[in-house]
Amino acid sequence: MHNPLPRSFYKQDLHKLARSLLGCLFVRVFEDGSRLSARIVEVEAYAQKDDPSSHSFNGKTPRNEVMFGAPGHLYVYFTYGMHFCCNVVAGKIGTGDALLIRALEPVEGIENMLVHRYGAITFDQKKISNLTNGPAKLCQAYKIDRSENGIDLCGNKIWIETGDELKQNKISCSTRIGINQGKELPWRYFIKENNWVSKPGKGIKYVD
């Protein structure tokens, strides 16, 4: 089944889109027909304006140009010399806003995710629980690297589709994780009490 969310979905305000993405399914289909899907349970917002931790803060560069393009595309970057992270471009063209996908709850294709991440299917519960509960981990599980940078999420390779509709009292927010600037901003959104969320975080509160 191929039912990607429309372009208009990604044109929402950055923080409204962050909340809307929670519970949706992140889907990838490979050339052999194998399919991965997982529920988005945690995202972080990054904006060009007033957010020094964002890749877009100092303007458009060859590295971050996808962030300034049309909403509903995947922005993939390489970090720490070893990991990839993927983001959903949000808002209007030129705004430089995006949402980092921080954690997923596997739904379909978990055996393939295990092979991609660990090299083999494993029944080790610790490894299973660590499969997609972090931005670099989920990229390994989905085999996402720089070659996926700029992919159209309204296309047929990687997309996001409607999943569980969440009540607002199921969504929490906190400060973001692993950054040196903008640490005070409560721009991390996640599903309350979901076991696949990466870390507890600080300053947690409910979203009104």
Image (tube, helix red, strand yellow):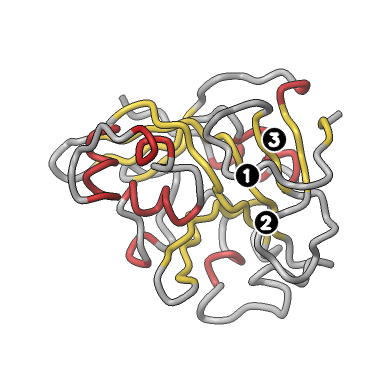
Q: CB atoms at circles 1 and 2 under 8 Å apart?
A: yes
Left/right placement of residue 150 relative to residue 116 reads right
Could you classify mark 1 by the number of other residues whose Cα lies within 10 Å: few (under 14), some (14-19), or many (20 or more)? Answer: few
Query: Are there few (<14), some (14-19), or many (20+) residues within 10 Å of tag 3?
Result: many
Cα separation, mark 3 vs mark 1, equals 18 Å
Instruction: Give the x, y percent position of residue 200.
Output: 68, 41
Sequence-wise, which precedes: disc 1 or disc 2?
2
Mark 2, Cα crowd under 10 Å, few <14 / some 14-19 / many 20+, is: some
Q: Name the residue under label 2.
A: 177
Q: Which corner quadrant holds the N terminus?
A: top left
Q: Where is residue 189, by image quadrant?
A: top right
Q: Is residue 48 above or below residue 160?
A: below
Residue drawn at x 76%, y 23% is: 168
Examine the rendered structure and indicate whether residue 172 appears above or below residue 186: above
Q: Disc 3 marks which amino acid? A: Arg
Instruction: Assign a secondary structure to mark 2.
Output: loop
Residue at 59 percent of width and 27 percent of height: 194
Give the residue at mark 3: 19
Secondary element at image label 1: loop
Residue at left offset 48%, top offset 59%:
85
Mark 1, residue position = 199
Mark 3 or mark 1, earlier in chain:
3
